[in-house]
Amino acid sequence: MFLINLQGKESIYEQIRSQIEKFIKSGILKPNDKLPSVRTLALDLGINPNTVMKAYQELEKNGYIYTVNKKGVFVSKDLDQIRNRNRKDALIMMETLKSEGFSKKDLLEVLDEVYDKEETC
């Protein structure tokens, strides 16, 4: 499920966090899906459990997951709140770029580049 690059620039916990976020945003992981326990994921990946715990703590802080004592870690029920927050962040970024002189055409070219890159991966 997870692809960890031990030689990469991104830390291991950031790789885990970003992959889980991506799985949630893409619908691979759905609300209330159970994630592997910290210990299980650490053993599967051959890493320190503290690394997994750090990724889970950050995901929980940002509303992507929640923990139920003695039950496990689950995908958040309220993903619409996350989508709304991400949309607001995107709007702020676009407004900033516009104020710095980016035209609509410039922004559309960047979006095309992002989506074309995604299709080739």
Image (cartoon, rainbow, N blue to C red):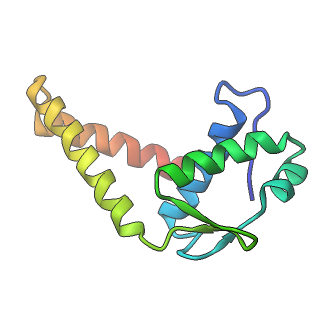
Q: Position of residue 39 (x, y in %)?
A: 85, 55
Picture layout, residue 88 above or below residue 95: below
Q: Quadrant of residue 47?
A: top right
Residue 121 visible in the displayed image: no
The front one of 21 and 62 is 62
Q: Position of residue 34 (x, y in %)?
A: 68, 72
Q: Position of residue 87 (x, y in %)?
A: 27, 54
The front one of 41 and 71 is 71
The front one of 109 and 40 is 40
Q: Position of residue 4 (x, y in %)?
A: 76, 42
Q: Does residue 12 appear to the left or right of 47 in the view shown?
A: left
Residue sitting farthest toward the front: 69
Q: Does residue 47 appear to the left or right of 64 in the view shown?
A: right
Picture layout, residue 99 above or below residue 34: above
Determine the residue positioned at 42% across, 71% down. 78
Determine the residue positioned at 90% across, 51% down. 43
Residue 48 visible in the displayed image: yes
